[in-house]
């Protein structure tokens, strides 16, 4: 990727909004086959997570009060991981569901 292409890509990223992210996740999920649970951190947006429609791979989101204020989020395959790190309010990501913890499940 040359500098002009990189610049265009960065400009595109800078203009992405929440609906663009969820549309991309929905499109990606429609093209994927098999078992998966995916988590990504998007700079300037936040944590996103999605799970295969058959729910073969486990995935959940938990929260805790941040040390500097605000809320910390954790995505993991098992609630015991969240409990061990002091997170609570475990919520399973349902089969075929995608989420951004800050904006909610879809």
Image (cartoon, rainbow, N blue to C red):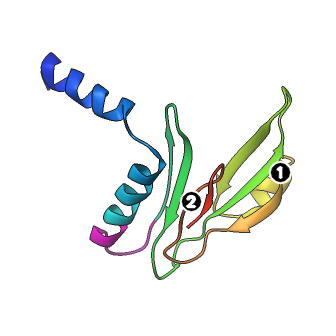
For label 2, the SS is strand
Distance CA(mark 1)–CA(mark 2) = 18 Å
Above or below 46: residue 102: below
Q: Nearer the viewer, residue 76 or 61?
A: 61
Q: How many marks?
A: 2
Q: Is residue 49 left or right of residue 88?
A: left
For label 1, the SS is loop
Marked residue nearer the N-terminal end (1 or 2): 1
- Which circle marks residue 42 in the picture? none
Q: Is residue 82 left or right of residue 19?
A: right
Residue 19: give x, y in percent of width and height: 44, 53
- Which circle marks residue 99 in the picture? 2
Tag 1 and tag 2, C-beta contact below 8 Å: no
Residue denoted by label 1: 87
Residue 59: give x, y in percent of width and height: 61, 65
Query: Residue drawn 29% across and 34% down?
Result: 12
Q: Is residue 44 left or right of residue 32?
A: right
Quadrant of the image containing the N terminus? top left
Is residue 106 one of those drawn in magenta?
A: no
- State which mark lies toward you, 1 or 2: 2
Query: Residue drawn 55% across and 67% down?
Result: 106
Query: Residue drawn 31% across and 74% down?
Result: 33
Magenta: predominant secondary structure element? loop
Is residue 31 one of those drawn in magenta?
A: yes
Q: Nearer the viewer, residue 56 or 104?
A: 104
Query: Residue drawn 45% across and 67% down?
Result: 36
Above or below 63: residue 12: above
Q: What segment carries the magenta color? A: 29-36
Residue 23: give x, y in percent of width and height: 37, 59
Q: Residue furthest bottom?
A: 54
């Amino acid at each position: 990727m040359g500098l002009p292409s990189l610049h265009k890509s960065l400009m595109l990223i800078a203009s992405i909004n929440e609906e663009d992210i969820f549309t991309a996740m929905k499109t990606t999920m429609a093209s994927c086959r098999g078992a998966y649970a995916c988590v990504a951190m998007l700079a300037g947006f936040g944590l996103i997570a999605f799970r295969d429609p058959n729910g073969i791979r486990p995935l959940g989101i938990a929260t805790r009060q941040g040390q500097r204020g605000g809320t910390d989020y954790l995505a993991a395959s098992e609630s015991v991981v969240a409990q061990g790190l002091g997170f609570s309010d475990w919520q399973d990501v349902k089969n075929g569901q995608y989420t951004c913890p800050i904006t909610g499940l879809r």
